[in-house]
Amino acid sequence: MTTLRKGRIGYPERTSSRVEPIMLEPELPIDMAYQETHIRAIIHPLNFHLGAGILAGNSDVFVSSATMIYYDPDDMNARLCPDCTVAFGVDVSYINERDGYVIWEMGKPPDFVLEVGSPTTADLDLGHKRRIYERRMGVPEYWRFDRSGGNLYRQALAGDRLVNGVYQPIEITTEPDGVIWGYSEMLGLSLCYVPDAAPERMPYDRAMLLFFDRETGQYLMTDEEEHAAYLETQAQLEESQARLDAERARVRELEEELHRRDSGHGPQGD
């Protein structure tokens, strides 16, 4: 069996490399169709920016939208599945094989969790889940994004930072064009609610949650933007290749014409 010892925040942590997958039935997704587009737009840029996961060559940064977090060693049914989970300095391979983020085995909670508001989960996000993230898990930052602009959470964007074991609201700023943002110390990024009324920020017909990087002065690209940029790059490459092929064909024609003239089989110039 896996031997446990005291972890950094009061949880025991694993000392064995043995992986025992959790066999519980997963929770059914709630309002997934309502949330899916926004969750994907959140997870993709974070994965890319943080270089998360083994495939990116970074095996100690974990980003997920579908991983259960287990927080009670005496009750494996005590678990939550945030819409976005970020953890630094963890064993990503072990989490994937375990099929769950087991806090007492990792020795720490995730560093950042975020929930996307939906009609059937909003009350849980504001009450039960917030208490669990704060009191049972000790998650340093807990954020909430309401795509409706505040109909579900009463705020379009809100975040809490753990201070001496208690969540304190993170300062949220509203810009003149309607963009609402707050800074995540855990991610080193600003979370920005970009409404439909700010199309110059995001030319989509829906409100979005974007991440702003102060170092570059730019928003992280969404999956749709990256795909559009990829298609544009491919089109440019194909256009460049077509011009190069045409130039090479013209050079061959000129070389053939010169060869005919030199051999006396072509028209002679003055």
Image (cartoon, helix red, strand yellow):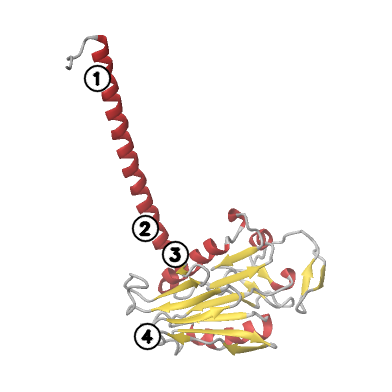
Residue at 60% from the left image edge and 77% from the top image edge = 185
Nearest to the eye among marks 1 and 2: give it: 1
Q: Is residue 217 left or right of residue 231?
A: right
Badge 3 marks a residue whose secondary structure is loop
Label whose residue precedes the other's in the sequence (1 or 3): 3
The earlier-in-sequence mark between 1 and 2 is 2
Disc nearer the start of the sequence (2/4): 4
Question: Which kind of residue does numbered mark 4 sit on?
Answer: Pro
The reply to whether dot 3 and dot 4 touch (C-beta < 8 Å) is no
Mark 3 and mark 2 residues within 8 Å of each other at the beta carbon: no
Give the quadrant of residue 259. top left
Earlier sequence position, callout 3 versus callout 2: 3
In this rendering, does residue 27 appear at all?
no
Mark 4: secondary structure: loop
Q: Position of residue 233 (x, y in %)?
A: 38, 51
Task: Give the number of the mark in front: 4 or 1.
Answer: 1
Residue 14, given in percent of the width and then of the height, sits at: 78, 67
Looking at numbered disc 1 in the image, what kind of residue is underneath it?
Glu
Q: Amino acid at mark 2?
A: Ala
Closer to the chain start, of discs 3 and 4, is 4
- Where is mark 2, residue-wise? 228
Left or right: 2 in relation to 248: right
Q: Residues within 10 Å of mark 3 (few under 14, many from 20)?
A: many
Amino acid type, mark 3: Met
Residue denoted by label 4:
176
Residues under labels 3 and 2: Cα distance?
Answer: 10 Å
Q: Mark 1 and mark 4 in contact (Cβ < 8 Å)?
A: no
Q: Earlier in the sequence, mark 4 or mark 1?
A: 4
Q: Residue at x 62, y 82 (%)?
A: 133
